[in-house]
Image (tube, rainbow, N blue to C red):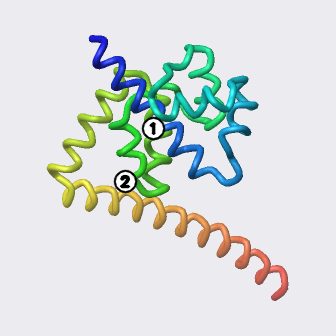
Amino acid sequence: MRKELDERGKRFGREIKTLRQSTPDVSQEALAAAVRYSRSAIANLETGRLDPALSQAFALADYFKMPLAQLLFEQEQELQRALSQEGRELLAILQQFEKGKLRMLRRCAKLIQQHQRHVLAYLDHQIGYTEDALTRRRLQQGEMGDGAGEGRQAS
């Protein structure tokens, strides 16, 4: 158990270092001042020689504008790096869902993957139908408006 905690602390430190170095103009000194740590404490944290206090871990997560869990779990970080901007936006949206709704979304995603061609055809039909209906409605309103205007001009 202690070894697992030590490894998690080291991953946390590596992630803080990566985030700090990838953020323009953020030195160890600047980060330390922002989270009320000393520069040497940030250096020790980044090398895994220091475990952060919980309040400071939250402060670091807040500084980088991300959930603490995201800093603690390397697998999620690797996933974030591999995703496009749209993928990261989708993950941010999914993090807002409750577990029950996530299970339903997961089931939908599996079904969509299995039946992709049919689902896409259905969605195209539904979207096309909706767009056709809106176009017809606009044309009818426009024609009625044009027709009424032409009638008045003719008389």
| Vertical side of 69 occupied by 88: above or below | below
Quarter-of-image position of residue 41: top right
SS class, disc 2: helix
Query: In this orientation, does residue 51 appear?
Result: yes
Q: In this view, does 31 lie to the left or right of 49?
A: right
**Residue 14, disc:** 1
Identified at 58% across, 29% down, the residue is 61
Q: Quadrant of the C terminus?
A: bottom right
Question: Quick one: which residue is furthest to the left in this view?
Answer: 114
Residue 112 horizontal/vertical position (percent): 23, 48
Of mark 1 and mark 2, the one earlier in the sequence is 1
* Place of residue 6 in the rendered image (x, y in percent of width and height, measured from the top left): 36, 20
Task: Please tell me how crowded label 2 is: few (under 14), some (14-19), or many (20+) other residues with Cα within 10 Å.
Answer: few
Total labels: the figure holds 2
Q: How crowded is mark 1: few (under 14 residues within 10 Å), some or many (20 or more)?
A: some
Q: Where in the figure is residue 151, as x and y percent of width and height?
A: 77, 81
Looking at numbered disc 2 in the image, what kind of residue is underneath it?
Ala
Instruction: Give above or below for 94 relative to 138.
Output: above
Q: Observer-nearest residue: 75 or 8?
A: 8
Q: Between residue 32 and residue 124, name the one nearer to us.
A: 32
**Residue name at image x 28 percent, y 35 percent:** 106
Residue 65 sits in quarter: top right
Q: Single out the mark in the foreground, 1 or 2.
A: 1
Per the image, the residue denoted by label 2 is: 82
Q: Can the viewer see residue 70? A: no
Residue in view at x 50 percent, y 47 percent: 89
The location of residue 45, given as percent across then percent down, is 53, 28
The amino acid beneath tag 1 is: Arg
